[in-house]
Image: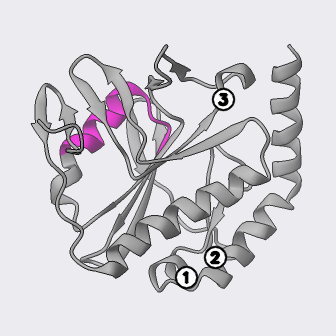
Amino acid sequence: MPPSTRAELVDGEVFLPSPVRKPADGSKRLDLAWFLTHYRAYTPGSDSGYNCTVRLCGQNEVQPTVSLIVRPEYGGQVAFDAGGFILGAPELVAEVAVSSVGIDRKFEMYRRFGVREYIIHRTEDEALDWFALRGRRFVSLVPDKADGLLKSQTFPGLWLDAPALIRRDLLAVLSALTRGVQSPEHAKFVKQLAKRRGA
């Protein structure tokens, strides 16, 4: 295949992603990356990547829309190979898809390899799902009863106003995330990461 071709290997089968049909769908990918990158800016020891190759094993090599990791030197669960590629399951993977049909197999693959949280923004349905790994299965996160926000269990302070992201109200998304990174649980997480780095 030409070097510029984007393809993914899922359980030994090659999949080509669907074309991005309109500018808005492409922008939604950037919105999701912006959300996670903004969190990274306030969380030393974390890192995010847009469309980066993730090598789970010889039969599974994917390029999620965006991933969020704890860097290895801060106790994260991934490593980097000699070429700089991610080895192992990122703590969080987020993808933009037209519908859930094209990602069903990836959902199972991410669960099996230990991705701790998985966000799927389905543009056709104008919906967003956030799953967290509990035991050996993914369960849906539900909005917090007090403020209606989705809150990461793996990355404290990563708070999302999902309806605002869907309607592309980035100021509202930023407002919720700002409250998250100013929360006591986020401050505690940052201290924990710093201690891991020191160790």
Q: Nearer the viewer, mark 2 or mark 3?
A: 3
In-image side of 108 versus 128 (left or right): left
Badge 2 crowding class, 10 Å Cα cut-off, few under 14, some 14 to 19, many 20 or more, is many
Any part of residue 146 in sight: no
Residue 50 against residue 146 in the figure, above or below: above
Q: Look at the numbered disc 3 and give the secondary structure of its residue.
A: loop
Nearer the observer, 71 or 51: 51
Residue type beneath disc 1: Ala
Circle 2 residue: 173
Circle 1 residue: 164
Residue at image location 89% in from the left, 18% down from the top: 198
| Quadrant the N terminus occupies | top left
Any part of residue 36 in sight: yes
Nearer the observer, 156 or 98: 98
Name the disc covering residue 28, or none.
Answer: none
Q: Mark 3 vs mark 1: which is more N-terminal?
A: 3
Circle 3 residue: 71
Give the image location of residue 183, x and y in percent.
85, 59
Residue type beneath disc 3: Arg
Reply yes or no: does residue 166 show up in magenta: no
Q: Look at the numbered disc 2 and give the secondary structure of its residue.
A: helix
Q: Mark 2 vs mark 1: which is more N-terminal?
A: 1
The chief SS type of the magenta part is helix
Label 3 – label 1 distance at C-alpha: 29 Å
Nearer the observer, 164 or 8: 8
